[in-house]
């Protein structure tokens, strides 16, 4: 929801700071006092095009900022986190815009520079302005479609349709690519096949290079290995070898241990050394037994290693990488074979199309049922909003298949009895458009995720009991939405939970506008003014007080 709005040197406002509350807030004031300034400022903060004429006369630049709580708008939060504007644990978003006298503007979200496109993307999720305004989201085909789908409870089916459409389109792209690149693919397949045949003919095995390198090195040095093993074995176990000399040393020390007990530790150490030397001898004998001096095997391994090295050089690889390259080539060849099987690709396209149309038709049925129900309920509410005989209709227009289904959604309205239905965005009267939007909101408010609704002069062309109905309808919306209404009618103003008044005054030959938060007595005076004009009598004050009490009940 909108938490705060600050303006400086904007139109006829020198400085303004507003704190917003939840519920229903009304904004009143004399004609020309500047009630639309708040909407214009919000429009700029939500991505409207800037104009240097919006800078207060005599100022160098206009500064606008707003603070939003987005804890209940997960989609907006995920977008901002993805763009690096918001942290995972943050829930407040500040938007700031500066306009200079040259007509240039700079925009910021959480003090990071952003584009107007980013402002519009996020703004559509934050505020919905109902009236003659570009931010009137219900004029958007996508919003109309999403609202109907939400009312129909079709979110799961909508997602399934989008996924099925994407799979169908991907299958079509695969087929088109195969048809268009048939010759190129054939050349590439021939290249891969030749490469595969060559590598497969060599048949490199996993870990083969490591084994060959070790085995070949051992065979090459087999004579040296045997000679060294025999020499060391003789030095250890020969007639005068180390083991024999150590044994004699140990025997001499053992003979004197009774006389010299300190020799005991030395005897133990000598026994340990003897045991370890015995193990060394065993290892040498084992190694000698495993050594083969096979000249033929040595030659075979040398040739195999040379073949592997030659192939690796050819493909600019290391020999140990050849098995992986063979697998990679085989996989690419299989994929290319699948990509060039035009009949299989055509069958895949047909299958994906059938799957898409089946789920899309389910969505069409849900939409048709929901459209009838939503249109009837909205029409019923319009009758209470000074639109007797008006009709609301949702037309499902068959269109080419898309990720949104098999039909285009169009909200249509006949504003007078007997008149023909027209697309809602073609309705001329701003007041009628705002009331139609109000009727829709009364039916669908629980499906609309936008937390802040603003109604610009929704009461145009109505009065009396109808104005009272409008006021209570807006107050009801304020129970689960933040609602702000600009109004000229005392009946609507009396229904507000919060009341702001726009005032205009002169200072140093300049006209300035300000907004004041009204308390109970001030509200009575303002409603009395709206009832009887500038001259406020006891009668109008009494009437205003009664109206305020009744409306709040």
Image (spheres, helix red, strand yellow):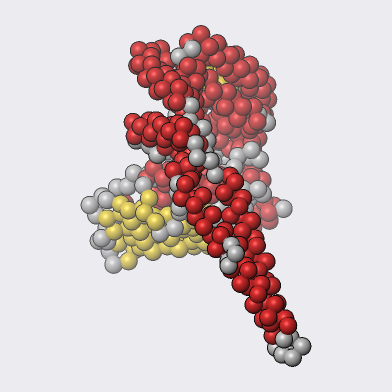
Q: Position of residue 202 (x, y in %)?
A: 45, 26
Which of the 4 image quadrants contains residue 525? bottom right
Q: Residue at x 47, y 23 (%)?
A: 200
Depth order, front residue of 343/388? 343
Instruction: For residue 539, say whether it is visible.
Output: no
Depth order, front residue of 349/162? 349
Count the labels in the image. Answer: 0
Vertical relation: 165 (above or below) 253: above
Instruction: For residue 373, say whether it is visible.
Output: yes
Depth order, front residue of 168/160? 168
Q: Residue at x 46, y 35 (%)?
A: 295
Residue lying furthest left in this view?
Answer: 102
**Position of 80 compared to 50: left or right?**
right
Q: Position of residue 430 (x, y in %)?
A: 47, 35
Q: Residue at x 41, y 50 (%)?
A: 45
Q: Position of residue 296 (x, y in %)?
A: 46, 32
Residue lying furthest bottom in this view?
Answer: 259
Depth order, front residue of 201/541? 201
Residue lying furthest front in this view?
Answer: 239
**Position of 553 compared to 207: left or right?**
right
Q: Position of residue 146 (x, y in %)?
A: 57, 32
Q: Residue at x 61, y 17 (%)?
A: 355
Vertical relation: 171 (above or below) 253: above
**Position of 347 compared to 85: left or right?**
right
Residue lying furthest right in this view?
Answer: 258
């Amino acid at each position: 929801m909108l938490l705060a709005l600050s303006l400086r040197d904007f139109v006829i406002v020198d400085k303004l700071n507003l704190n917003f509350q939840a519920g229903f807030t009304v904004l009143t004031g004399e004609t020309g006092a500047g009630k639309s300034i708040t909407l214009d400022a919000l429009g700029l903060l939500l991505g409207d095009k800037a104009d240097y004429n919006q800078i207060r006369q005599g100022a160098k630049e206009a500064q606008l900022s707003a603070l939003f709580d987005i804890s209940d708008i997960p989609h907006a939060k995920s977008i901002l986190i993805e763009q690096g504007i918001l942290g995972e644990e943050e829930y407040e978003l500040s938007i700031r815009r500066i306009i200079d006298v040259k007509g240039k503007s700079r925009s910021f979200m959480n003090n990071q520079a952003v584009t107007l496109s980013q402002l519009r993307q996020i703004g559509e999720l934050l505020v919905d302005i109902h009236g003659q305004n570009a931010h009137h989201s219900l004029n958007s085909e996508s919003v109309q479609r999403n609202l109907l789908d939400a009312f129909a409870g079709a979110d799961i089916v909508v997602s399934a349709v989008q996924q099925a459409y994407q799979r169908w389109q991907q299958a079509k792209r695969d087929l088109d690519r195969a048809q268009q690149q048939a010759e190129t693919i054939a050349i590439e397949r021939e290249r891969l096949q030749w490469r595969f045949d060559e590598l497969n003919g060599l048949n490199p095995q996993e870990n083969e290079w490591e084994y060959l390198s070790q085995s070949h090195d051992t065979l090459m040095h087999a004579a040296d290995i045997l000679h060294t093993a025999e020499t060391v074995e003789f030095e250890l176990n020969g007639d005068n070898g180390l083991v024999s000399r150590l044994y004699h040393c140990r025997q001499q020390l053992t003979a004197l241990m009774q006389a010299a007990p300190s020799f005991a530790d030395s005897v133990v150490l000598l026994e340990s050394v003897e045991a370890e030397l015995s193990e060394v001898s065993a290892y040498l004998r084992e190694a000698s037994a495993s050594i083969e001096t096979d000249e033929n095997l040595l030659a075979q391994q040398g040739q195999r290693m040379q073949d592997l090295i030659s192939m690796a050089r050819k493909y600019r690889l290391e020999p140990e990488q050849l098995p992986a390259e063979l697998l990679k080539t085989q996989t690419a060849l299989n994929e290319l074979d699948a990509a060039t099987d035009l009949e299989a690709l055509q069958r895949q396209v047909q299958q994906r199309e059938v799957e898409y149309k089946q789920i899309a038709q389910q969505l069409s049925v849900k939409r048709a049922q929901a459209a009838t129900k939503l249109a009837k309920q909205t029409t019923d509410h319009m009758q209470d909003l000074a639109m007797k005989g008006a009709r609301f209709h949702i037309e499902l227009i068959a269109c080419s298949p898309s990720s949104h289904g098999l039909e285009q959604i169009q909200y249509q309205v006949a504003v007078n009895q007997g008149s023909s239905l027209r697309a809602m965005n073609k309705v001329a009267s701003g007041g009628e458009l705002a009331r139609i939007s109000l009727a829709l909101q009364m039916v669908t408010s629980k499906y609309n995720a936008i937390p802040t609704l603003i109604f610009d002069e929704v009461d145009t062309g109505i009065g009396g009991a109808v104005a009272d109905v409008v006021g209570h309808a807006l107050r009801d919306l304020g129970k689960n939405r933040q609602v702000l209404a600009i109004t000229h009618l005392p009946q609507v103003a009396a229904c507000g939970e919060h009341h702001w008044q726009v005032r205009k005054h002169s200072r140093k030959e300049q006209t300035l506008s300000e907004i004041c938060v009204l308390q109970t007595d001030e509200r009575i005076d303002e409603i009395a003014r709206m009832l009887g004009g500038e001259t406020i009598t006891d009668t109008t004050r009494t009437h205003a007080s009664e109206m305020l009490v009744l409306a709040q009940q």
